[in-house]
Image (cartoon, rainbow, N blue to C red):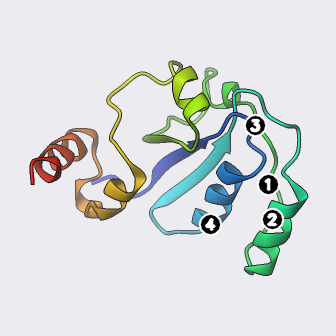
Amino acid sequence: MQTRYNVLFLRTGNSARSIMAEAIQQGKPNFTVYSAGSQPAGAGRSETLKQLELAGLPTDGLRSKNWEEFAKPGASQMNFVFTVCDNAARELSIWPGQPIGRISLFLCLPLSSLDQLAVKKEIDRIGQR
């Protein structure tokens, strides 16, 4: 089993929800989390950063990023890519592979099943219930 997984959250503007996902998950022992957008806003929304700070989460280094940063040669390979808006989902063709379904379903998976084949089998099994 792989010990750390790279996870990318995508939102068209990458100024609020995807940045929140990145901030909330940073520091978790099994995941390295990133966020990006197809049309990045250039900065995180001030309201988002304020709410993260109020929750006691670090905001240093959080910024609005273009998803092309994560698709160019030499970039870290993403194990999981989630979209947090329909617009980004429609534009998502840069990361080929098997989509794994909803985040809530993903969170139900045991960590031991987080390799690509096991994830597909587990989602199929859960989906048949």
Q: From the viewer's perspective, is 127 left or right of 98?
A: left
Q: Residues within 10 Å of mark 4 (few under 14, many from 20)?
A: some
Towards the viewer: 49 or 76: 49
- Kindly identify the amino acid type of the residue bearing the numbered disc 2: Thr
Residue plotted at (34% across, 52% down): 2
Residue pointed to by mark 1:
62
Residue pointed to by mark 3:
13
Residue 118: image location, x then y, percent: 19, 46
What's the distance in space between the residues labelled 4 and 3, CA to CA? 18 Å
What's the distance in space between the residues labelled 2 and 3, CA to CA? 18 Å
Residue 99: image location, x then y, percent: 35, 33
Residue plotted at (86% across, 53% down): 45
Q: Are marks 2 and 1 in contact (CB under 8 Å)?
A: yes
Given this view, does label 4 or label 3 mark the residue nearer the observer? 3
What's the distance in space between the residues labelled 4 and 1, CA to CA? 11 Å
Residue pointed to by mark 2:
59
Quadrant that contains the N terminus: bottom left
Of mark 3 and mark 1, the one earlier in the sequence is: 3
Q: Residues within 10 Å of mark 3 (few under 14, many from 20)?
A: many
Residue 29: image location, x then y, percent: 48, 69
Q: Are marks 3 and 1 in contact (CB under 8 Å)?
A: no
Towards the viewer: 31 or 123: 123
- Kindly identify the amino acid type of the residue bearing the numbered disc 1: Leu
What's the distance in space between the residues labelled 3 and 1, CA to CA? 14 Å
- Kindly identify the amino acid type of the residue bearing the numbered disc 3: Gly
- Kindly identify the amino acid type of the residue bearing the numbered disc 4: Ile
Q: Is residue 56 above or below residue 97?
A: below
Q: Secondary structure at mark 2?
A: loop
Which label sits on residue 24?
A: 4
Q: From the viewer's perspective, is 11 left or right of 94?
A: right
